[in-house]
Image (cartoon, rainbow, N blue to C red):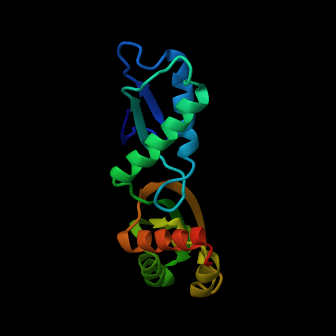
Protein backbone atom coordinates (compact mmCIF):
# COMPACT_ATOMS: atom_id res chain seq x y z
CA UNK A 1 0.00 0.00 0.00
CA UNK A 2 1.36 3.41 -1.02
CA UNK A 3 -0.03 6.75 0.11
CA UNK A 4 0.28 9.64 -2.37
CA UNK A 5 0.15 13.33 -1.51
CA UNK A 6 1.53 16.63 -2.87
CA UNK A 7 5.30 16.90 -2.42
CA UNK A 8 7.42 19.84 -1.34
CA UNK A 9 9.82 19.60 -4.29
CA UNK A 10 9.45 19.04 -8.02
CA UNK A 11 11.21 15.67 -7.66
CA UNK A 12 9.62 12.59 -6.08
CA UNK A 13 9.80 12.45 -2.29
CA UNK A 14 9.83 8.77 -1.30
CA UNK A 15 9.44 7.53 2.27
CA UNK A 16 8.72 4.20 3.85
CA UNK A 17 6.82 3.52 7.05
CA UNK A 18 6.82 -0.26 7.08
CA UNK A 19 6.35 -2.00 10.42
CA UNK A 20 7.16 -5.61 11.16
CA UNK A 21 9.11 -6.38 7.96
CA UNK A 22 6.08 -6.73 5.64
CA UNK A 23 8.43 -5.60 2.86
CA UNK A 24 12.16 -6.30 3.30
CA UNK A 25 14.42 -3.22 3.11
CA UNK A 26 16.24 -4.52 0.01
CA UNK A 27 13.04 -3.99 -2.04
CA UNK A 28 12.53 -0.32 -1.11
CA UNK A 29 14.77 0.89 -4.00
CA UNK A 30 12.75 -1.23 -6.45
CA UNK A 31 9.51 0.38 -5.25
CA UNK A 32 11.04 3.85 -5.63
CA UNK A 33 12.40 3.00 -9.09
CA UNK A 34 8.97 1.76 -10.20
CA UNK A 35 7.40 5.03 -9.04
CA UNK A 36 10.07 7.19 -10.71
CA UNK A 37 9.65 5.35 -14.02
CA UNK A 38 5.86 5.68 -13.81
CA UNK A 39 6.10 9.41 -13.10
CA UNK A 40 7.61 9.97 -16.55
CA UNK A 41 4.11 9.58 -18.00
CA UNK A 42 1.26 11.32 -16.21
CA UNK A 43 -2.32 10.06 -16.28
CA UNK A 44 -3.87 13.27 -17.69
CA UNK A 45 -1.94 13.98 -20.89
CA UNK A 46 1.23 11.92 -20.63
CA UNK A 47 3.46 14.70 -19.28
CA UNK A 48 5.88 13.99 -16.40
CA UNK A 49 4.47 14.25 -12.88
CA UNK A 50 6.01 16.72 -10.42
CA UNK A 51 5.56 17.53 -6.74
CA UNK A 52 4.64 14.01 -5.65
CA UNK A 53 5.27 12.46 -2.25
CA UNK A 54 4.84 8.69 -1.93
CA UNK A 55 4.93 6.81 1.34
CA UNK A 56 5.21 3.02 1.31
CA UNK A 57 2.98 1.83 4.15
CA UNK A 58 2.48 -1.89 3.63
CA UNK A 59 3.01 -4.78 1.27
CA UNK A 60 3.27 -8.53 1.04
CA UNK A 61 6.46 -10.50 0.73
CA UNK A 62 6.77 -14.13 -0.33
CA UNK A 63 10.04 -16.10 -0.17
CA UNK A 64 9.60 -17.66 -3.61
CA UNK A 65 7.59 -15.16 -5.69
CA UNK A 66 9.03 -11.85 -4.49
CA UNK A 67 11.65 -10.12 -6.65
CA UNK A 68 12.80 -6.61 -7.40
CA UNK A 69 10.81 -6.70 -10.65
CA UNK A 70 7.64 -7.77 -8.81
CA UNK A 71 7.93 -4.83 -6.39
CA UNK A 72 8.72 -2.44 -9.24
CA UNK A 73 5.61 -3.57 -11.13
CA UNK A 74 3.47 -3.40 -7.97
CA UNK A 75 4.65 0.20 -7.40
CA UNK A 76 3.75 1.07 -10.99
CA UNK A 77 0.25 -0.38 -10.58
CA UNK A 78 -0.22 1.45 -7.26
CA UNK A 79 0.85 4.69 -8.97
CA UNK A 80 -1.67 4.30 -11.81
CA UNK A 81 -4.51 3.52 -9.42
CA UNK A 82 -3.53 6.17 -6.87
CA UNK A 83 -3.12 8.96 -9.42
CA UNK A 84 -6.62 8.37 -10.80
CA UNK A 85 -8.02 8.97 -7.31
CA UNK A 86 -5.76 11.94 -6.51
CA UNK A 87 -7.42 14.60 -8.73
CA UNK A 88 -4.19 15.56 -10.54
CA UNK A 89 -4.01 18.88 -12.40
CA UNK A 90 -2.17 19.93 -15.53
CA UNK A 91 0.57 22.52 -14.97
CA UNK A 92 1.92 24.98 -17.49
CA UNK A 93 5.27 26.83 -17.48
CA UNK A 94 5.09 30.52 -16.55
CA UNK A 95 7.85 32.82 -17.75
CA UNK A 96 9.08 36.16 -16.50
CA UNK A 97 9.10 38.50 -19.49
CA UNK A 98 10.87 41.88 -19.53
CA UNK A 99 10.04 44.08 -22.52
CA UNK A 100 11.95 47.26 -23.35
CA UNK A 101 9.96 49.65 -25.59
CA UNK A 102 9.64 53.37 -26.42
CA UNK A 103 7.04 55.20 -24.27
CA UNK A 104 4.64 55.59 -27.20
CA UNK A 105 4.11 51.80 -27.48
CA UNK A 106 3.38 51.10 -23.78
CA UNK A 107 -0.41 50.76 -24.17
CA UNK A 108 -0.12 48.42 -27.14
CA UNK A 109 2.47 46.23 -25.38
CA UNK A 110 0.44 45.97 -22.16
CA UNK A 111 -2.71 45.15 -24.16
CA UNK A 112 -0.83 42.47 -26.11
CA UNK A 113 0.59 40.89 -22.93
CA UNK A 114 -2.92 40.83 -21.40
CA UNK A 115 -4.26 39.05 -24.51
CA UNK A 116 -1.59 36.42 -23.94
CA UNK A 117 -2.96 35.73 -20.43
CA UNK A 118 -0.05 37.70 -18.97
CA UNK A 119 0.03 39.53 -15.63
CA UNK A 120 1.87 42.84 -15.73
CA UNK A 121 3.94 43.14 -12.55
CA UNK A 122 5.35 46.58 -13.12
CA UNK A 123 6.72 49.28 -15.39
CA UNK A 124 10.11 50.90 -14.92
CA UNK A 125 11.36 54.04 -16.73
CA UNK A 126 14.62 53.58 -18.63
CA UNK A 127 16.98 56.08 -20.18
CA UNK A 128 16.38 57.43 -23.69
CA UNK A 129 12.57 57.54 -23.45
CA UNK A 130 12.25 53.78 -23.02
CA UNK A 131 10.06 51.86 -20.59
CA UNK A 132 10.58 48.37 -19.19
CA UNK A 133 7.44 46.27 -18.75
CA UNK A 134 7.81 43.29 -16.40
CA UNK A 135 5.19 40.55 -16.68
CA UNK A 136 4.54 36.86 -16.07
CA UNK A 137 3.15 35.07 -19.12
CA UNK A 138 2.40 31.40 -19.87
CA UNK A 139 5.14 30.09 -22.13
CA UNK A 140 2.57 28.64 -24.54
CA UNK A 141 1.44 32.21 -25.35
CA UNK A 142 4.95 33.44 -26.21
CA UNK A 143 5.82 31.41 -29.32
CA UNK A 144 5.24 34.22 -31.86
CA UNK A 145 6.18 37.05 -29.52
CA UNK A 146 9.42 38.13 -31.24
CA UNK A 147 7.60 38.66 -34.55
CA UNK A 148 4.59 40.33 -32.91
CA UNK A 149 6.77 42.67 -30.81
CA UNK A 150 8.74 43.69 -33.90
CA UNK A 151 5.46 44.40 -35.70
CA UNK A 152 3.87 46.37 -32.83
CA UNK A 153 6.98 48.53 -32.16
CA UNK A 154 8.21 48.83 -35.77
CA UNK A 155 11.36 46.96 -34.73
CA UNK A 156 12.17 49.22 -31.76
CA UNK A 157 11.23 46.83 -28.93
CA UNK A 158 13.22 44.03 -27.34
CA UNK A 159 12.50 41.45 -24.67
CA UNK A 160 14.00 38.76 -22.49
CA UNK A 161 12.20 35.73 -21.17
CA UNK A 162 13.11 33.15 -18.53
CA UNK A 163 11.29 30.29 -16.86
CA UNK A 164 9.79 31.29 -13.50
CA UNK A 165 7.64 28.38 -12.22
CA UNK A 166 4.79 26.01 -13.01
CA UNK A 167 1.17 27.01 -12.38
CA UNK A 168 -2.11 25.16 -12.76
CA UNK A 169 -3.41 25.56 -16.30
CA UNK A 170 -6.90 27.09 -16.61
CA UNK A 171 -9.62 24.43 -17.13
CA UNK A 172 -10.31 25.40 -20.77
CA UNK A 173 -6.61 25.10 -21.69
CA UNK A 174 -6.18 21.85 -19.71
CA UNK A 175 -9.21 20.29 -21.43
CA UNK A 176 -7.76 21.09 -24.89
CA UNK A 177 -4.35 19.61 -24.01
CA UNK A 178 -5.89 16.46 -22.49
CA UNK A 179 -8.21 15.98 -25.49
CA UNK A 180 -5.27 16.41 -27.89
CA UNK A 181 -3.20 13.86 -25.96
CA UNK A 182 -6.13 11.40 -26.05
CA UNK A 183 -6.42 11.84 -29.84
CA UNK A 184 -2.70 11.21 -30.29
CA UNK A 185 -2.84 8.10 -28.07
CA UNK A 186 -5.71 6.69 -30.13
CA UNK A 187 -3.79 7.36 -33.36
CA UNK A 188 -6.22 9.90 -34.87
CA UNK A 189 -3.80 12.83 -35.38
Rendered position, 38 above or below 167: above
Q: Is residue 132 visible?
A: no
Quadrant in the picture for the C terminus: bottom right
Q: Quick one: 145 or 22, which is closer to the camera?
A: 22
x and y percentages locating residue 27 in the rendered image: 54, 22
Furthest toward the top, the residue is 20
- Which quadrant holds residue 9? top left
166 lies above or below 150 = above
**Viewport quadrant of the N terminus:** top left
Q: Is residue 4 above or below residue 57?
A: below
Occupied quadrant, residue 161: bottom right
Res. 150 in view: yes
- What residue is drawn where x is 41% and y is 18%? 22
Q: Position of residue 66 (x, y in %)?
A: 55, 24
Q: Which quadrant of the figure has residue 90?
A: bottom left
Give the tally of numbered discs: 0
Residue under the image location 53 percent in, 30 percent down: 71
Image spot of residue 82 (x, y percent): 38, 45
Q: Residue at x 58, y 84 (%)?
A: 153
Q: Residue at x 48, y 73 (%)?
A: 179
Whole-percent x and y of residue 117? 42, 73
- Is 183 or 100 nearer to us in this picture? 183
Q: Is residue 128 left or right of residue 80?
A: right
Q: Nearer the viewer, residue 60 or 137?
A: 60
Amino acid sequence: MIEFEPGETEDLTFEEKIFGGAVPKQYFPAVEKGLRESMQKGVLAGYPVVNLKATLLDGKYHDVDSSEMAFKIAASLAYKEGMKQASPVLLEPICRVEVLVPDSYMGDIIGDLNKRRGRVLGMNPHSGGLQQVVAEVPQAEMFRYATDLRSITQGRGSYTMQFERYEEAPPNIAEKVIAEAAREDSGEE
